[in-house]
Amino acid sequence: MPELIFNELSLQSDVNNTEHAHSLLKSFFELCDSVNNLKIGTLKIKIGKEFSTLLFKGVHYNIHNFLPRLEADERNRYSTYLAQTSFISDNPYYSYDGAEAIGFGYAYENDQITVSINNADNWSENSYTITKEYLLEEQDAEVVVENKEVKHLPHENQLDTFKPFFIESALKNAKFNVSNILTIEDFWNRRSEIFEMLDFSVESENLLKKFTSISHPHFSKAMNYFERLNLHLLEVSLGRKKFDNLPGDISLDGEATLNKYSNERIFTLPSGNAKIFSTHAKLGGNLRIYLYPEESRGRISIGHIGHHLNTVNFKN
C-alpha cells in the first residue's frame, strides 16, 4: 500500500479563519486522493501523533470539524487514509529551519515521501534539506550534525515525479514473508493488510484453520499462491499484465460437475452475496484454491482452500 508521511510543521503557518482551514484540509486530502488513484493499494497517511489532536495555528479547527462537512463517500475515504495508529519515532533528532521535524525525520529513516498542508504554496518543493543530530556510541563522543534530503510531494501535478517510487515500493511490499505471521488466526486478522488486492469468503476462515498451524505445508503453499495472485492484481492495476492471465495451473469446473456438485462450490463474498466458484488453482497433490475473479473491481475473492472437491470424475 502507498504511504505518505505527514509534515506536522505545515500546520504552523497562519490561517485566516475556519473556512480557510477547511479549504486547506480539502486541498490536502485531494492531493492524497491523487496518490490513492494510482490504484496500487489503499493509501495510508502516517503521522507522529493522532491526526485529530492537530490544530491549525491560531484557529480551532481540526479533523473532527472537517469530516462532518463532507459527503459520506469522501468522509469514509479520508477516514480510511487515517485509520491507523500513529508512529512512535525513536530516530535521531531531526530539525528543519531550527524546529524539530518528526515527520521529515521518520520519512528519511524509512525512505518514504512526505506531504504537507500547503498554505500559500509555502511547502512547494520536491525535497527538503533537514538536519540530523546524533551521538556516536563511543564514550565522550561529540554530537554529529549532518544534512539529509527528504522527498516531498507538494502538488498533484508533481505526482509523475514520484510515481515510479510508489510503484516500486508497492511491488516490493507485495512480497509475503511467512515469518511475519504468528498463527493462522493472526493471518486472518491481518489478511487485508497482507494481501491488499484479495478478498476472502466468510467460509475460508474455517477452511484455513483446518491446517491447524502455519507450519502445515498446505498453509505455506496457499500463502505462496496468494502472494502470486496479489502481485498479479497489482501489476494488472499498473497496466503490466492482463487480468485474465491468472498465475498457476488454472481450471474451470465443467457444466456436468457444476450441475451435480455446485453446492460444494457456494461461498459468501465479503459483501454478503453467495456465489458459485468454478475457477480454481491446482497447487499440487490434492490441494485446490477456488477463486471468484471480478475484473470490473480488479479483485479476486478466495473461496475454497483445501482438498480436491468432488467432480463427475473424482470422488472424495
Image (tube, grey):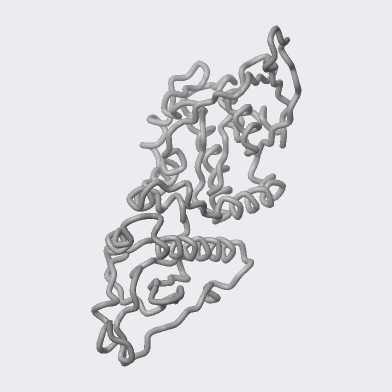
Q: Quadrant of the C terminus?
A: bottom left
* Residue 158 in view in this figure: yes
Residue 274 in percent (x, y) is at: 27, 70
In depth, the one of 128 and 146 nearer the eye is 146
In depth, the one of 23 and 176 nearer the eye is 176
Residue 159 in percent (x, y) is at: 66, 47
Q: Left or right? Give the position of 156 relative to 221.
A: right
Q: Left or right? Give the position of 59 relative to 274.
A: right
Q: From what the image shows, is residue 44 above or below residue 279?
A: above
- Residue at position x 39%, y 74% in the image: 288
Residue 149 in percent (x, y) is at: 73, 31
Q: Left or right? Give the position of 133 relative to 237.
A: right
* Residue 119 in view in this figure: no
- Residue at position x 29%, y 62% in the image: 210
- Residue at position x 48%, y 29% in the image: 19
Place residue 238 in its image quadrant. bottom right
Q: Left or right? Give the position of 239 relative to 47.
A: right
Residue 102 in percent (x, y) is at: 58, 24
Q: From what the image shows, is residue 257 above or below residue 66?
A: below
- Residue at position x 38%, y 76% in the image: 286
In depth, the one of 96 and 278 nearer the eye is 278
Place residue 220 in its image quadrant. bottom left
What is the tally of numbered marks visible in this picture? 0
